[in-house]
Structure formats: C-alpha cells, structure tokens
Amino acid sequence: MANILVVGSMNMDIVTKVERHPFPGETIQGNATTFYIGGKGANQAVAASRSGAFVTMAGALGTDSFGMDISKRLAEAQIELGCVVRKPVMTGIALITIDQAGENNIILSAGANEAYGEADVDKLELLEYDIILLQNEISSAAITRVLDRAAEANIPVFMNPAPIAGFDADQLRKVSFLILNELEAEELSGIRIQDINGARQAAKQMLEEGIPHLIITLGSKGSLYMDQAGMHVEMPAFTVAVVDTTAAGDTFIGAFAAKYAEGVEIKESLHYATAASALAVSAAGAQSSIPTEEQVSAFLASVKF
C-alpha cells in the first residue's frame, strides 16, 4: 500500500445551485445551498485514500465548528490527522455556485490554510512517505518549505499549482510531477490551449524548463501525459452526464497518485484516474462525489474504452 502525505488546504464548501452565474453587480436567486467538506488538499487526500493508499493529511484548521466537522469527516474517510494543526482563526471557506450545466465558480477565503507556515512544515517527518501531494491553497512560505525539504529528502512531489494566481513558477524545478488543467497550463507556458495540439505545445514548453513528468487535464477532451524520457500518452475522457465538476480535478490527481505510487504503470494509472474523475462529475458535492476503488473498478468493467 502506498504511503502518501498530502500537505494542503481543508475548507468548508458552501455550495449554491443557480440557473446561471450572475453578471458583475447582479443579484440572482439561488435554488438550494448545501455545506460540503472540501479544499484541494482534503479532496485529493480523500481521493487517494478511496483509491487504496494510506494517506496522512497535513495542514491547518480553525478552532471553530467547521474545523471540528472537517476533522470528523476526514477521520471517517480513514485519513490520518496527526499532522493537522489548529490555528486561532477561521477555518478555510469556499463559496461555490453551480449552474445548470454543472459548471462552477469558486471564491476562496483561506483562513487557517494561510496560517499554516514553515514552522509547521518543519515538524513533518517526510521520510515516512512514498510521495507528497501539494497544491497552492496554503501559504507560499509553507509551499516553498515543503518543496525544499522534499528535495533534500529525495521524496517526489506531485504538484497541482491551483489556484494559479500567485504561484511562483520558479518552484517548478523542485517538482517531480506537475499536474494542472488547461487554464493553468496556459498561464505557466504562455501558450493558448484550444485543442490537443495546443496542449502538446504547452507541455513541450514546460518540459523544456526541466519538469520530469507533466500531466495536463483537458476536461471532456481527456488528459495528456509527457515526460523527459519521451513518453507521450493521450487519454480520452469517458462520456457521462455532468452534475457537478467541483472535485473532478482533485479526484483525478488523488486517484492517479495512489495508483502510480502503488506501482501501477503510467497509462493504466491515467486510465483509472480518468474513470474516477468521470464518476466524480456524475455526483454532487466535493468529497461526497469522490468514488471508491470498488466503484471505479465496477465502472471500468461496465464501459467500453
């Protein structure tokens, strides 16, 4: 069983369904509001755990009721919480609207996630883990410290630089696997991605900067993998009815990391992760939509690829 450390965010997601997203300055009527446990770090941790990995979560929660709720739910997902610290601030919050097409808009209020810093990272025993999953929803100081310590310990880091705003591209040289969506790839490469050809060009540009392994997720167009050894895999997406895309990318990343760390080869890991993300968009919520290994296996057995 793979042993994965996720260093990242934990949020309470406040999700409102709308017929369409509002224009600037416009007030519209929401159809329903629901509270879900989320945050990219927590979502990826749940996805990796449900895909068969042993997962430890590192990050910060507030001392409020949201923090207690998140701890309880992550423990129920079989995630080790001994590296989660409490900060005397509000737990992170995500305000999410989802339209009739299942597309979402998200506003993050970092709270305790931003309060997680270098001193907290220095308490982590990194040598206990096979890989580290990292995102861009905690403080930049903590991210830099994780990358530096992982490099010293020779622990591979799977980096998801989301949200891309404020991400320090100079840190990419310390990343083993860069996993990002097409908008993030456009931002980092400077290349417009309108189709798979654009994704190939962007991937090639980023590989020239020294990134060992790169995955670009392309939504309904699937995903693209390229590496320094010249391996190139284009994985098509499964066709499913979209309900909510909120945790699709996090599900893909956590599922892929779990399988790859387990020793599954690249193409099969991508295939599994693609199926997991397809199931995630077929259900509402963030962590509530993330499938188990058994559900993904059943789905793959039921479809032609």
Image (cartoon, rainbow, N blue to C red):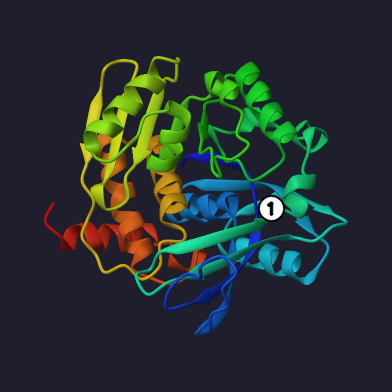
Please tell me whether mark 1 sits on a helix, a strand or a loop.
strand
Find disc 1 in the rendering and name its residue.
81
The location of residue 144, given as percent across then percent down, is: 68, 28
Q: Amino acid at mark 1?
A: Leu
Q: Please name whichever residue, 13 or 23, is drawn nearer the observer in this view of the structure.
A: 23
The residue that appears at 47% across and 29% down in the rendered structure is: 188
Residue 78 in sight here: yes
Q: Please name whichever residue, 202 or 4, is drawn nearer the observer in this view of the structure.
A: 202
Q: Is residue 120 above or below residue 98?
A: above
Question: What crowding class fits label 1: few (fewer than 14 Cα within 10 Å), some (14-19), or many (20 or more)?
Answer: some
The residue that appears at 77% across and 71% down in the rendered structure is: 65
- Residue that protrudes farthest toward the right in the picture: 88
The location of residue 247, given as percent across then percent down, is: 46, 58
Question: Residue 125 is drawn in which quadrant?
Answer: top right
Question: Residue 134 is drawn in which quadrant?
Answer: top right
The location of residue 131, given as percent across then percent down, is: 53, 33
